[in-house]
Every structure is written in C-alpha cells, then in structure tokens.
Image (tube, rainbow, N blue to C red):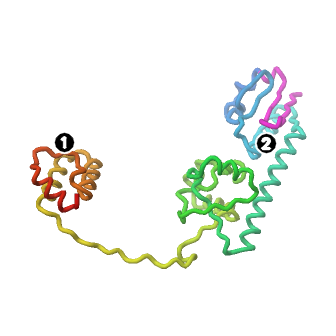
C-alpha cells in the first residue's frame, strides 16, 4: 500500500513518497495538473513546497493528496507539526478578524483606512508585519483596486487570487467586501464634514499675435507627435523661451522677445 507523508519543517511544506512512486509521480497527470504548482524542488522521494505557500495552500495540498492516495488505494499521513501549524495560523487570523470587528463596533469615529502600500517605506512594512493591529491613513478615499489593500496578506488571510481581485464579478465583489469589512472603512468628505470646494474662477487671457504665430509653428512641427505638442504648448504657456528653438526655426528674435515679454519671461 502506498504511503505518503506531508510534513512541515518550520520553513516549508514537504511531501515524502516511496522511492518507486517518486520516479513516476512527476510524470503523472495528478502531478502535472494539480500538484506541480505547489512544488519547488524534488530530491529523491522528498518533494519540497514553494516558500511562498500559505496555510491555505497547505490545506489544498492535503486535500489533493488525500484524494490521490484514495484513488491509488494508499494512505496519507499528516504530521503533527503540519497540523499544528495550520491550526495555529487559522486561529491567529481568526483572532485578527474578530479584533477588527470589535474595534469598529467600539468606536465608530475611528476610521482605519488602508493605504496603497507600495508608497510606504520597507522599514515601515517590516515594523507593520510584527504588529497585532495597524491603522494607516490615506488621502485617497477609494483604492484603485482590491490589490491596493494589504496585498501581502491576501493569499494567507483572504485566499483570493490576483486574477479574481483584478476582475471580480458582482457576486465575488460582495464576498470580498464582506471579508474586508472588519479591516477597511471608507470615508467620504461628507462623513468628515469637509466644506464643499469653492467654484473655479476662470480668467480669460487672449493670446497675442506673436503667441498665436508660435502656436501655429508648434502645431506644424509636432503634427505627428501629440505628446511632444502638448509638452511644447505647456512650455509656451509658461515662458516661450522654454520652447526648443530647434522645433521652431525661421522665426524672428523679435517675435520670441515679444511673446516672452507678455509671459513675464
């Protein structure tokens, strides 16, 4: 009877199989379609899991191996170390989930918000990884996507794939929002009683003959490059002397001087 052993050595998941099975397993449909994505290397009958695997991945591997062993008429043993690690991580994350709910229920005015963490320095991230509770503030009221919200813990805590988070269906969005609810609180300017923005004041300043001539030359020179035209127009608006004269040849110094004088340059 085939006997497989799943273990955790403190750093990675390991799968030990008999030597005979170790020779054929990598070529099986089960390994290629299901197990290979979790394996980093093989040394004889020992298969070592990838370092980035989470306890949720461990549970998936256990389920896959149990099913395959049952199909072969074999047996799978899960070591106490692996079982304890999975249970410990599950309990820790469940406690964090409850803590988030308790904090939000205790103080409605406390508005913890996640920040786009790519803008936080590595030292702050290392410190945050050791903390039990973290509050981060941002001036951005709405994240660009779900991936902006604590990306380093998605795999282990929430268990959602990057593909799902990039293009979720309405039903998947409801599920993700429910899981995020204890940890993410969105606020608006109305919630914070921020006064409405003042209306814009539009000041019209007609262009001079010289400025219009420069603009016409820019349009001709940059006709095939809209980005270059946009940048040159910005420079023209600030100070015509910023425009590259190599782009505008054949224009008199008088025109340049007159346009620059109007812009304050």
Is residue 27 or residue 114 the one in the foreground?
114
- Judging by the rendered image, the residue that carries numbered circle 1 is 246
The correct choice, above or below, for 17 with respect to 253 in the image is above
- Disc sitting over residue 63 in the figure: 2
The residue located at (24%, 56%) in the rendering is: 239
Distance Cα–Cα, label 2 vs label 1: 69 Å
* Residue 27 picture quarter: top right
The residue located at (57%, 62%) in the rendering is: 138
The residue located at (82%, 20%) in the rendering is: 20
- Disc sitting over residue 34 in the figure: none
* Quadrant position of the N terminus in the picture: top right
| Mark 1 burial class by Cα count in 10 Å: few <14, some 14-19, many 20+ | few
The correct choice, above or below, for 79 with respect to 28 in the image is below
Highlighted range, magenta: 1-22
Which label lies toward us, 2 or 1?
Answer: 1
Q: Regarding mark 2 in the picture, which secondary structure is present there?
A: helix
């Amino acid at each position: 009877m085939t006997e497989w052993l799943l273990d955790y050595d403190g750093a990675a998941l390991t799968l030990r199989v008999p030597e005979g099975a170790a020779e054929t397993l990598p070529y099986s449909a089960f390994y290629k379609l299901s197990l290979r994505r979790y394996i980093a290397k093989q040394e004889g009958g020992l298969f070592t899991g990838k370092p980035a695997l989470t306890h949720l991945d461990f549970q998936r591997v256990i389920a896959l191996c149990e099913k395959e062993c049952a199909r072969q008429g074999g047996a799978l043993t899960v070591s106490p170390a692996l079982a304890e690690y999975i249970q410990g991580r599950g309990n820790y994350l469940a406690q964090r989930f409850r803590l988030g709910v308790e904090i939000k229920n205790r103080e409605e005015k406390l508005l913890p918000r996640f920040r786009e963490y790519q803008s936080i320095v590595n030292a702050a991230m290392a410190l945050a990884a050791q903390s039990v509770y973290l509050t981060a503030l941002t001036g951005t009221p709405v994240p660009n996507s779900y991936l902006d919200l604590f990306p380093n813990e998605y795999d282990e805590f929430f268990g959602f794939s990057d593909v799902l988070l990039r293009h979720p269906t309405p039903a998947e969005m409801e599920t993700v929002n429910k899981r995020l609810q204890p940890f993410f609180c969105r606020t608006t300017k109305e919630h914070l009683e921020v006064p409405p923005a003042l209306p814009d004041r539009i000041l019209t300043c007609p262009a001079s003959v010289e400025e219009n001539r420069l603009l016409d030359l820019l349009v001709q020179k940059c006709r095939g490059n809209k980005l270059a035209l946009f940048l040159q127009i910005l420079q023209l608006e600030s100070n015509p002397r910023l425009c590259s004269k190599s782009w505008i040849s054949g224009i008199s110094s008088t025109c340049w001087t007159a346009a620059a004088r109007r812009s304050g340059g």
